Image: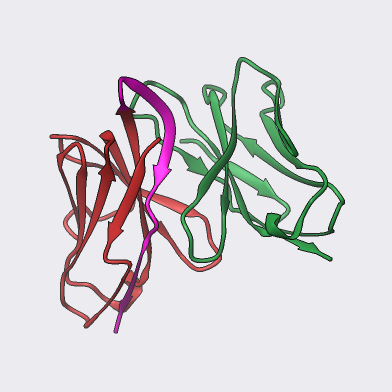
Chain colours: A green, B red
């Protein structure tokens, strides 16, 4: 089955700096890559996603890049703010309609310091 | 999108008892529901996938007789932890996929989770 690796496990940046989180996946058939933000004790919230037919997607301070050949995808957060502090999970799935399941990475704990 | 609720949010039970957790989607046709387990500071591990009206598909290593899943309607799924033991203590989260107002969503919408503590 699919295996998703995520790095780093923890990341500390100063407010205003950029943060980059990287993931790799094993199944070349995966074609949907969402990123979730989870605050302590809360539900995961989708922040951005990308499909395999595009290489990059941006939404304000957040961007995701995908390299299908290398099976890498990354989350980029620019101009970080304290409220960006949370655990971020990448995921991969093979979208086949309604039943596609997600395989999650191990998570990155991002700490934005003042 | 979907608004997903779980009940209860927290439950403490004695070892050997069974606990039922409900996952509801509001104004959303949840054709597929997923149940995850999350240990502290760990990732979400998929336990099972269920389609409305069908038996759940369990992931490898998940005991189907211990974790009973029922997805009887498009808005409700239940997870019952039978004969719970301390090692079953965890954060259980459901998610839904489906449609509303004729729009099919690829995204999974997560519930707020249920923290189970087995004494």
Q: Residue at x 52, y 55 (%)?
A: B43
- Is residue B17 visible to the viewer in this orientation of the structure? yes
Whether A1 is among the magenta residues is no
Please tell me whether residue A102 is drawn above or below residue A10 in the rendered image: above
- Is residue A110 visible to the viewer in this orientation of the structure? no
Q: Number of numbered discs present?
A: 0
Determine the image quadrant of residue B100.
top left
Q: Nearer the viewer, residue B4 or B54?
A: B4
Q: Residue at x 30, y 20 (%)?
A: B102
Q: Residue at x 49, y 66 (%)?
A: A41
Q: Is residue A76 left or right of residue B82?
A: right
Start and end of the magenta stretch? B100-119
On the image, the x and y values in percent for residue B22 come to: 22, 56
On the image, the x and y values in percent for residue B115 come to: 36, 69
User: Which quadrant of the rendered structure holds the C terminus of chain A?
Assistant: bottom right
Q: Nearer the viewer, residue B2 or A104?
A: B2
Whether B101 is among the magenta residues is yes
The prevailing secondary structure element of the residues shown in magenta is: strand
On the image, the x and y values in percent for residue A84 come to: 69, 54
Q: Is residue A53 left or right of residue B106?
A: right
- Residue at the extreme top of the image, as rendered: A53
Q: Residue at x 41, y 42 (%)?
A: B109
């Amino acid at each position: 089955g699919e295996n998703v690796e995520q790095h780093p496990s923890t990341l500390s940046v100063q407010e205003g700096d950029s943060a980059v989180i990287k993931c790799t996946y094993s199944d070349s058939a995966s074609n949907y890559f969402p990123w979730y933000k989870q605050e302590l004790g809360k539900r995961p919230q989708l922040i951005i996603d990308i499909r395999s037919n595009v290489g990059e997607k941006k939404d304000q301070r957040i961007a995701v890049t995908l390299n299908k050949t290398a099976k890498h995808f990354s989350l980029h957060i620019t101009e970080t703010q304290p409220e960006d502090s949370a655990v971020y999970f990448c995921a991969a799935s093979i979208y086949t309609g309604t039943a596609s399941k997600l395989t999650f990475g191990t998570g990155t704990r991002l700490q934005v310091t003042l | 999108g979907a608004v997903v609720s779980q009940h209860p949010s927290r439950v403490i039970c004695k070892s050997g008892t069974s606990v039922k957790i409900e996952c509801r989607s509001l104004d959303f046709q949840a054709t597929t529901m997923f149940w995850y387990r999350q240990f502290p500071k760990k990732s979400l591990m998929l336990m099972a996938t269920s389609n409305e009206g069908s038996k759940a598909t369990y992931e490898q290593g998940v005991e189907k007789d211990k974790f009973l899943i029922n997805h009887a309607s498009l808005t409700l799924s239940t997870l019952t932890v039978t004969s719970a033991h301390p090692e079953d203590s965890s954060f259980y989260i459901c998610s839904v996929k489906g449609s509303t107002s004729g729009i099919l969503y690829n995204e999974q919408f997560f519930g707020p989770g249920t923290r189970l503590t087995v004494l």
